[in-house]
Structures are given as structure tokens and as C-alpha cells.
Amino acid sequence: MTQLLLEVKKITDFKSLPDGKIREAIQKMKRKLKLKTDEEFYYYIKFQPYSKILFHQYLCDVLNTRSKFFKDEDTFEILRKEFIPEIIRKREDDKSLRILFLGCRTGEEFYSFIFLMSAYFWQVLHDWDVVFYGVEPSDYWIKEAKKGVYNIEKSVNMDTKMYERVFRVAKHQLLFSVDFKKKMKIRFENLPFKIILQKSLPDDVFDIILCREMIFREEPQNFEKLLNFLKERLREAGIITTFDIYIPDGYKFFDVVKKEGRYFYRK
């Protein structure tokens, strides 16, 4: 394992993380992919497409860095300034938007995107038909997302005005305000990604598809197939983003996929 650890750190650029956490992520990934030996794991992570992306997601798991409000605030800001206004312009005739979040977990990041749309675009969208879909393969996580009840500590990254607009506080818990729930059309679907690959989605076409890192962890071998399938479901000017797809020491990247191509952004 010592030699494998050195090789993995060299290949993936995760030199600054604790050895114990890297070992734990290796073991989790080996079990999931049914890789029996260190040698099999080494060749997988060195030569398989997207293997580094997948390994990063397992590291996120063991480091417990998931599911926070506005965890990807810088990514949301780029989407808000560069992509969402164009999408809204393209939909002005029929005044409808369909937004899909794949891998919504317990809902914090899914709701963060809804907060963003509410805060910056609702003056335009208030009379539109806007539906937000959260899709999650885990029964447990989808139940938590549907409840939408969070510890008050979760509000730490939130803008005060946004916090006051969408939440009320009861017994040290954050609960969505009645007005916010009435205003938003929010739907949740408990769908394994294998079902999605069989062309089952909660709507026919979408304007924004946000793919959380879970798609890499659950279906790494089918990632390109899933991505191509999702591209077919985009409306004009629609986008797919997988958020942070690879984080070597000191750098962050995320990608935006349109019908005509794929673009990588360094943050």
C-alpha cells in the first residue's frame, strides 16, 4: 500500500492531503469497482478516463466536504453572470424553464441554486412556469431533501438577506418560509442512475442540468454515455455543468456542456 500511496499522490496531485484519508479513499474505490489488488487499482487510476475525477469524489466522501449551502458559490456566480441570462432570453416566448439537479443528496446545494434564481432573476421569472427537479438515487438522502429541515449552523455561508427571505428559525433549525414554498415549484425524484440511462427523466427537455459528483462515483464507466444522453435533452442555449471536475493542488476547474461543445473553466 505504501508504494501505491506514493504513486497515487504522484498521479493525482493530492500531495497535501493526509495519507490516512487517501488510503481510505483508495479502499472505498477499490471495493466499489471490485479491484482486488493494488496493481489493478494503479493501472485503473493511471489509464482509465475520468479515474482521477472519480478518485476526487471518494476523497470528498472521506473528508466529509459534501452538502453545504453555497459550497460552489464561485461556480454559481459564473453561471449567474455568463449563462443564465442568455437562457432566460431564449425562453422569453414561452416563459418556461426546466432545471434538473442530478445527485441532490440532502438538498443543500440544490436549494442553493434555487435561492440564487430567486434572489437574482425572480423579478423576470415571477410569472413564468419554472420547475426545479432534484434527482437522487439514495432513498435516505431524498427523504432528507424533501423535508428541507437543517441545523442553523448550515446558514454560515449564506447572505443575510437571502437567509431572511427563505427561512424561518424554530428550535435551532432552519425551516423554509411558507411564502418561499408557495412561490417555487420543486419536485423530487428517487431515481438510480441506471434507470436514467434507460432514458427515464422527470421531464422531456431541460434548460439547466446540474450534475453532482455522484454521477462519477455511481456510474464512472457510463459517464460519457450519460453525458451524451443529457445533451440530447437540452433546449436551445441549455447547459449542463458537472461543477468541480478535477482539483489538483491549488487549482479548480469546472465544465459547462452545450449542444455544440464542452468548455472548461479554471476558477
Image (cartoon, rainbow, N blue to C red):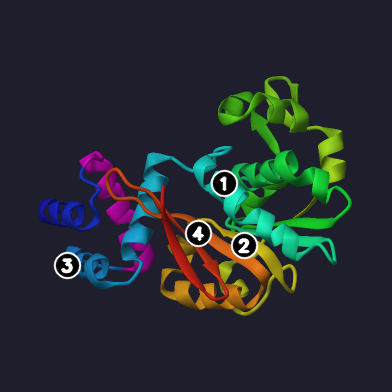
Q: Percent from the top left, x then y, of residue 183?
A: 85, 44
Residue 162 appears in the picture as rendered: yes
Secondary structure mainly formed by the magenta segment: helix
> Are dots 4 and 3 in contact, CB under 8 Å?
no
- Residue identifier under label 3: 39
- Residue identifier under label 1: 76
Q: Nearer the viewer, mark 2 or mark 3?
A: 2
The earlier-in-sequence mark between 4 and 3 is 3
Kindly identify the amino acid type of the residue bearing the numbered disc 3. Glu
The boundaries of the magenta stretch are 16-34
With respect to residue 127, does 65 lie above or below? above
With respect to residue 64, does 236 lie above or below? below
- Residue identifier under label 4: 242
Given residues 6 and 236, the one toward you in this image is 236
> Are dots 4 and 1 in contact, CB under 8 Å?
no
* Label 2 to label 1: alpha-carbon separation: 13 Å
Q: Percent from the top left, x then y, of residue 107?
A: 63, 45
With respect to residue 48, does 125 lie above or below? above
Which label number is shown at residue 209?
2
The earlier-in-sequence mark between 4 and 1 is 1
Determine the secondary structure under disc 4. Answer: strand
Left or right, residue 18 beside residue 172: left
Kindly identify the amino acid type of the residue bearing the numbered disc 1. Phe
